[in-house]
Image (cartoon, helix red, strand yellow):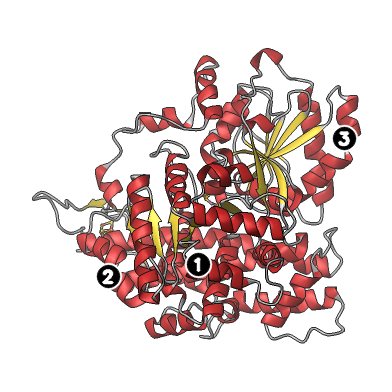
Amino acid sequence: MKSQKSIDPAALELLPKAALDGVETVWDRYEAQQPQCGFGSLGVCCRHCVQGPCRIDPFGNGPKAGICGASADVIVTRNLLRQVAGGAAAHVDHAYEAVEALELAAKGNINYSIADETKLQQIARGLGLEVSDKNKADLALEVVEAAYADLANHGSKPVQWLMVNAPKERIAVWQSLGILPRNPDREIREAMHQTTMGMDADPVNLVLSTAKQGLVDGYSGLKLATDMQDILFGTPTPVVTEANLGVLKEDCVNLIVHGHVPLLSEKIVFWAGKLQEEAILAGAKGIQVSGVCCSGNEVLMRNRIPLAANYLAQELAIITGAIDAMVVDVQCIMPSLAKVASCYHTELITTMPIVKIPGATHVPFTLEGADDTAQVIVRKAITAYGRRNSKKIHIPNYKQKIVAGFSVEAIVSALSAVNPNQPLKPLVDNIVNGNIFGVVATVGCNNVKATQDIVHVELVKELVRNNVLVVATGCSAHALAKAGFMNSEGTETYAGEGLKAVLTAIGQAAGLGTPLPPVLHMGSCVDNSRIGDLVTALAGYLNVDSASLPVAASAPEPQHEKALSIGTWAVTMGLTTHLGVVPPVLGSKAVTELLTNGLSDVIGGKFYVETDPLKAAQGLLEDIRSKRQKLGLPC
Ligand code: NFS
Ligand code: SF4
C-alpha cells in the first residue's frame, strides 16, 4: 500500500483536522476496504447473470470458466466494454442536456443567451449548413436539429459530429475496422446487450466494440458537449486566477460548485455576483464562489472562478469548516459528502433528478426555473453563513496563481501574434526543430490508490524538463495548477531550455509580458474534445495521420469510467495512452497483450500502464522519440 495520502500541502494540513473532528474521509474508507478483492482487481469476476457471481482463477488450479463457459478473456473484455459504455453514457447524457438547453435558449423559452455567435457559425459551417444572413437563434436551431438527428438517427449512418470533426485518415481506419458509431444511444444500448449473458464470446470483437464506445464518447459526448457549451456560454479565453483551498475566504460566504454540467453553475456565478449586498447585510464581506472537479473547471475557464479542490479533496473542502454551501449537479460526487457536511454547518445541495443524497437538501434544477433555483441556492449559502462555528474553521494558506482558459481558439490567437497567416506554423516549426520535443495531454482524475496528485506532478515535471509541452484537463489540470505548473514562474522553474524559449517568445509576441505556462489548462473533462481538435488541427496542418504525431496522452490517476472511455478514444485517435493506475484487465493475458500492444497494429494507438511516474515519463518520451524518428525529425 502507498505510504502517503497526498502531496498537496493543503490536504496534508487538513487530514489531522479531519481526524480531530472525527470525520471519516475517502482515505479511511480505502483502508477499511483492504485487502481489495483480487478477482475484481484482475477483472475476472462476472455478475452479468444470476447464476453468478463467477470467478476465474487466473493462476492456480481453480475454475477456468464461468458457469456458462465464459473464459477469463471474455469476462475481462465484457467488463471493460461495460465500463467504457458507462463512461460514454455519462458524457452523451451531459451533451444531450446541453443540446436541449441550446434549443430552449434559441426558442426564447429560457433565460440563457447564445453567447458565442462566431463559434455557432463555425460549427454550423462545419456541419455544411448555410450560414449567411441567418440570425443566431435560427442558426442555433438548425445546429440543434443536426445534433438531435445524430442522437436519434435510426439508420446505419455514422455519427455526423464524428464525420465532420475527426481526421480523415482516422475515419478511414475506423471504417475499415467496422467501428464507426451510429446513433450513440443505440451504440450504448447495443454494448449493454452485447455483454449480457449468452452473447458475444469473442474477446477481439468485444475490444473493437469497446473502441467504438470510445468514439461514441469522443464525438457524441465530449465534442458535442463542448460545442453546445461554447455556443451558450462562450469559448474560453485566457484568465488569471488561483487554485487550492487557500482561495476560500474566511470573511466571505463560501459557495462551492461541484459536478460537471455548467448549466446551473453559470447561473450560480451570476447570482452570487448579484446578491453580494445580501451577503454583506448578513455580516460577510461578500460571496466567494469556488469550484470542485469539472463544474469548477467550467466556471474557471469562462468566469475566472478559482479552483478549490480536485476529486480526492472534495471532502476536505468541507472539513475546512468554511464552506457555507456546496451545490452539486452530476458525476464524481462522493455520497459521503452528506455525512461530512453534517459535522459542520455546511449545506449540501443536490439539484438533479438522478443525483439525490439522503441528508442533503434537494433543490430541483430546471432550465426554465434556473434563475430562481440559483437564487434559492445562493440565499441558502448566505443563511448558512450565520450558522458558522468559528472554532471549526481552518483554511490552509496554500494557493497558486494560475493562467487558464486555453481553448484551441485561445492558443491559435496567441500563436497568431507570431504568425498571423499560419498560426500553427510556429508551434509546428518548434516541434520539428526539437525545441518542443512533443506534446502530452494529461487528463482525468485522482484515484485513492495513488498518493493524491503525485503521478500527475512527478510525470509532468519530468516531461516539461524534457521540453514536452503539456496540455491538461479535469482533475489532472487541478493537480498541476496547485503544484505551480500554470504560471510563468512554472516555466522558469520546470521547463527545459527549448520549451522555455518557445513559451517566452509566444508570451512576448502575444503581449503578455511573461512566458506562457508549461502546462496549458484546456478545461473540463468534456473539453478533452479541445485536445482532440488540437491534435486534429496539427495532423491536418502537417497532412499526416494523428497516429504518427509526436503526441501522447496520459491519465495519471484515473478512477472514473469516464476516464476509461476518454482514454479509449485517445487510443482510437492513434495515441499511446498512459494509465498510472492498473485497470481491471490483468486477469486475461491475451486481452492485456491486445490492449497494450496488439491494438497498435490495427488502430495506431495503445494503452501503456505504468504506476511509477518517472518510468512513465521515460516510456512516453521513448514513444515520442520513436514517432519523431519515423517522421525524420531530430531526436
Ligand atoms: Ni473527469 Fe471531471 Fe475529476 Fe475524473 Fe471526475 S471530476 S469529468 S472523472 S474525478 S477528472
Ligand atoms: Fe457466470 Fe456466465 Fe452468468 Fe457471468 S454470465 S455470472 S460467467 S454464468
Q: Please tell me which residue is depicted at 51% across the width and 85% down the height of the picture.
A: 156
Q: Is mark 3 within 8 Å of ligand 1?
A: no
* Residue contact at pointers 2 and 3, CB within 8 angstroms: no
Q: Give the mark nearer the N terminus: 2 vs 3.
A: 3
Residue 329 visible here: no
Residue at which label 2 appears = 598
Please give left or right for residue 321 compared with residue 8 in the image: right
Work out whether mark 3 precedes mark 1 in sequence or the reverse, and give the earlier one: 3
Q: Confirm or deny contact between disc 1 and disc 2 (CB under 8 A).
A: no
Q: How far, Cα to Cα, is label 3 from label 1?
A: 48 Å
- Location of residue 320 in the rendering, given as x and y in whole percent from the top left corner: 62, 24
Q: Nearer the viewer, residue 590 or 450?
A: 450
**Callout 3: SS:** helix
Quarter holding the N terminus is: top left
Question: Residue 521: image x %, image y %?
Answer: 61, 53
Residue occupying image coordinates x 41% and y 82%: 173
The quadrant of the image that shows the C terminus is bottom left
- The percent coordinates of residue 35 (x first, y second) are 28, 34
Instruction: Name the disc covering residue 431, or none.
Output: 1
